[in-house]
Image (cartoon, rainbow, N blue to C red):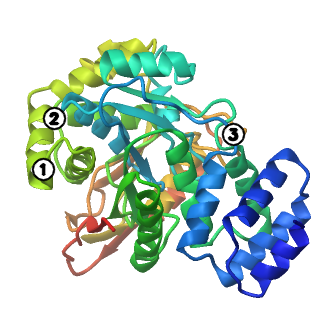
Amino acid sequence: MRMVDIILKKRAGFELTSDEIGFFIKGYVDGSIPDYQVSSLLMAICFNGLNANETAHLTMAMAYSGDTVDLSAIAGKKADKHSTGGVGDTTTLIVVPLVAACGVPVAKMSGRGLGHTGGTIDKLESISGFNAFQSNEDFIRIVKETGLSVVGQTGNLVPADKKLYALRDVTGTVESIPLIASSVMSKKIAAGADAIVLDVKAGDGAFMKSVEDAFLLAKEMVAIGNQVKRKTIAIVTDMDQPLGCAIGNALEVKEAIRVLNCEIKGEIREVSLLLASYMLYASERCVSVDQAYDLAQTALETGKGAAKFKAMINAQGGNGKVVDDPDILSIASDIFEVKAQRDGFLNKISARKMGEAAMLLGAGRAKKDDQIDHSVGVTIHKKAGEAVKAGDVMARMYVSREKGLYEAGRLLESAFMIKDDPIKPGSVVHGVVQE
């Protein structure tokens, strides 16, 4: 078998076999197939696509290109959740404890943030002492003892995805739905969960800008998961505006804790409960989504979710007292306010600009090796649909350095779109894909 023949076959629009896909993935990982040939194949895939069988074969070849996580030592069906990336989106920190509190173990591997989107591992590391990098043995032990654990991806998990993603980034082949779907699902499958719920973002602050493209991606990923016998459900949610009111690592942890302590309602609470409901349903803990929602809401309102979060923090070396008193989080003390320039109605808040502003303050990374400041970020004080007056505080910047402050302030001012006429905010949930 020759790589050039595989390239020519896909260039001509023909279906690749499982053996051909496996050959290219194995050769790329072991170094016997060079970047320039893989780049050519990726471009052919971008132009001609992959069908459902090809996408499933690619996903599985990537998933088993390195180590996999065996969760069989943990009793029952294991659930996992993935978000395609958003701004002010702390749902993982709320959803995982709620699902665990309802009796479904959650063994989750998460990533760091890059660009204007946040990363769950960065958020958790704003908690004093929290260790996000556990051995596989300790990861499984913590889940068995507490019902949940969130860790960073370590070792040789899905090396094919790491190499392919880096190559796609520099060859203009990122925006291919089959390649995106196989990238996400290969990591989820390698991580070993039985049930997977995907939060697919659509809008200004998301990778998928249109709702239509988000649904296409959701359907592709659900098809992959179900084809390889992992119960998979996707929920398409809005990211035209930040989901919560906090952007930045410690600030977002504080907001998540306040939701778990029933101090905050609104969209972030509702989306979290919905995601938790589908995780419980996909794991067969409940016979209906409605029953699952009631169970998750009870876990929230009785404090069982907060207790689970505290148990996980303690088990991973962190200071669990933060759940009782989130004010002990280290948050920058220098605060600058962004105020409305005119009277009117707030029609929209650009999620992308809000995320970029927080990144400029030091809360995110422009490059993978950038150091972040867990203490900085932005809080939002007006939501779309509200009436505002000139001089009203729209946002606050929590700052620890001068660098980027002016640019961040200008971005935030332009992120708030104030018009003369009021609007009715649209739904934050666009729909659910189950097959």
The numbered disc on residue 162 is none
In this view, the mark in front (3 or 2): 3
Find numbered disc 3 in the image and state the secondary structure of the residue it sits on.
loop
In the image, what residue type sits under mark 1? Val
Find numbered disc 2 in the image and state the secondary structure of the residue it sits on.
loop
Between 422 and 278, the residue placed more toward the observer is 278
Q: Quadrant of residue 11?
A: bottom right
Q: Which residue is mark 1?
A: 287
Q: Residue at x 64, y 61 (%)?
A: 58
Q: Is residue 3 visible?
A: yes
Q: Residue furthest bottom?
A: 12
Circle 2 residues within 10 Å: few <14, some 14–19, many ≥20: few
Q: Quadrant of residue 423?
A: bottom left
Find numbered disc 1 in the image and state the secondary structure of the residue it sits on.
loop
Mark 1 vs 3, N-terminal side: 3
User: What x and y, as percent, mark residue 338?
Assistant: 40, 52
User: What x and y, as percent, mark residue 289?
Assistant: 15, 54
Q: Which residue is mark 2?
A: 263
Between 385 and 371, the residue placed more toward the observer is 371
Distance between the alpha carbons at the discs numbered 3 and 2: 43 Å
Between 210 and 254, the residue placed more toward the observer is 210
Circle 1 residues within 10 Å: few <14, some 14–19, many ≥20: few
Q: Which residue is mark 3?
A: 66
Distance between the alpha carbons at the discs numbered 1 and 3: 36 Å
In this view, the mark in front (2 or 1): 1
Q: Are marks 2 and 1 in contact (CB under 8 Å)?
A: no
